[in-house]
Each structure stands twice: as C-alpha cells, then as structure tokens.
Image (cartoon, rainbow, N blue to C red):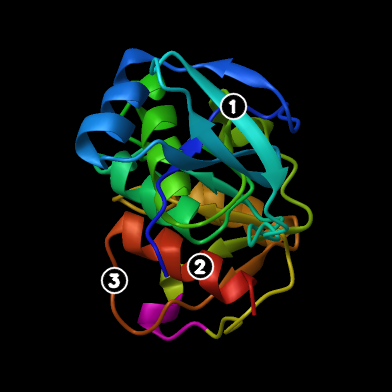
Amino acid sequence: MKNIPRIFVGDNIKPGMIIPASREVAHYLSHVMRTHDTIVFGGGHEYNATLDDAGKNIIVGADTGHADPSGDITLYFAPIKRTDDLINMATQLGVKKLVPVITEHATAHHINWERMKKIAIEAAEQSNRNSVPEIATPIKFADLDLSGFAFADERAAYGAKCANATENKSILVGPEGGFSDTEFVALDAAGAVGISLGQTILRAELAAAIAVSKATK
C-alpha cells in the first residue's frame, strides 16, 4: 500500500475546501515526500487531498471512509519529566482527551504545553487516527471528582489485590514518586478502581500506556 502522508488541518473539514498550506507543509510534501497527494484529517474524519501546483493551497477531496480508531478514554496524568513520551504513546493508543493533574509528588511544573500539542498532532498523523486528543488546562488533584475513575495502583507491586482491567473511561496515573498517602485515601474513599500494572514499579510514561491498554479491553 502506497505510503501517503497524512496532515492534520483542523477539526472542521469538508470536501471541496481550499486550505492554505503552511511553508512547512508545502516543503514536506513537495521536497521531503516528493508528492502533491496527501490525506488530511480532523474531527474524526479523513479525506483525500492534493497540494496545488503552486504549493500554496491544499484542496480537499472525498472522504476516504476510514473510521477513526480513536477511543473515548480520558487520561488524567501528573506532569513528568518525559511528558512528551507519555503524550506520544497515549495519542497512539487512541486516547480522546489528556488532562494534566497536579499531585502532591508532581515535580514537572514547567511544561511547554504548546510543544505537547505539536507532539500529539505528529503522533496522530503517524498512527492513522482521524483526530488529535484535546490537552486540557492542568487541574489540581484536590479538585477532581474521583468517582468513576480507575487509576494505576503501584500498591499492586507490594501485594495489594487490584483489578487487571477496567471498563472505566477516566484513567488516572501518578508522577514518578507515585501517589501520596493522602491521595490514596481519597481514591479509595471515592471508590476509584485500582488497576494492577504488574509486580514491578514502572516509569510513569510506561505506566500510563499500560493503564490505557487495560481500559480498552
């Protein structure tokens, strides 16, 4: 199957639209991929498209009929040193929305969120999904309504009995230092479902990916 480059152009796309092509996009198609044929996507849909001969505009064609493989999971996560890897993996796994949560042990407080949005776009382009996950404004752990949540429970590595999968669509993952005792009390009191990630302590970005995969089964 021919490798046709995929470009995210926004969420409101219709056949026949003429979309101005940025210099970066025009260069990528014409000089890197050496083609004027492309696929544009956004808002859950995907369309055949063409860069015009002048390299100025993208002309949107027919819907490809490709169904968006993205899911309906919202991933709540504590910002970490490798937030870029976490967002990349979560996007590839089809997460619908990403919500940064400031927990007691969170140490990464100066994240470039505009860069994180670009990483999500690039991951969506590469992973064949028709949408880019929303990245919400950071929220404090204390302000979360934890009812209906599932969370990556590192206590499983110390013998606690936890679920192996969950039907919950709101998943919470802690920072490198894990959840605090106070946060565990709040999670347990709210009836949040602890998910086992195995008998070892994982890096936070890997824990997020595995927790999402356990929620999609």
How far across and how far down the image is residue 55, in percent?
38, 18
- Most foreground residue, 150 or 44: 44
Q: Residue at x 63, y 32 (%)?
A: 60
What is the C-alpha distance between the residues marked 1 and 2?
Answer: 40 Å
- Badge 1 marks a residue whose secondary structure is strand
What is the C-alpha distance between the residues marked 3 and 2?
Answer: 13 Å
Q: Residues at badges 3 and 1 in contact (C-beta under 8 Å)?
A: no
Is residue 157 part of the magenta span, yes or no? Answer: yes
Q: Residues at badges 1 and 2 in contact (C-beta under 8 Å)?
A: no
Q: Which residue is mark 2?
A: 211
The region drawn magenta spans 156-160
Amino acid carrying label 1: it is Ile
- Most foreground residue, 111 or 97: 97
How far across and how far down the image is residue 25, in percent?
36, 25
* Dot 1 or dot 2, earlier in sequence: 1
Disc number for residue 201: 3
* Dot 3 or dot 1, earlier in sequence: 1
Q: Residue at x 36, y 40 (%)?
A: 105
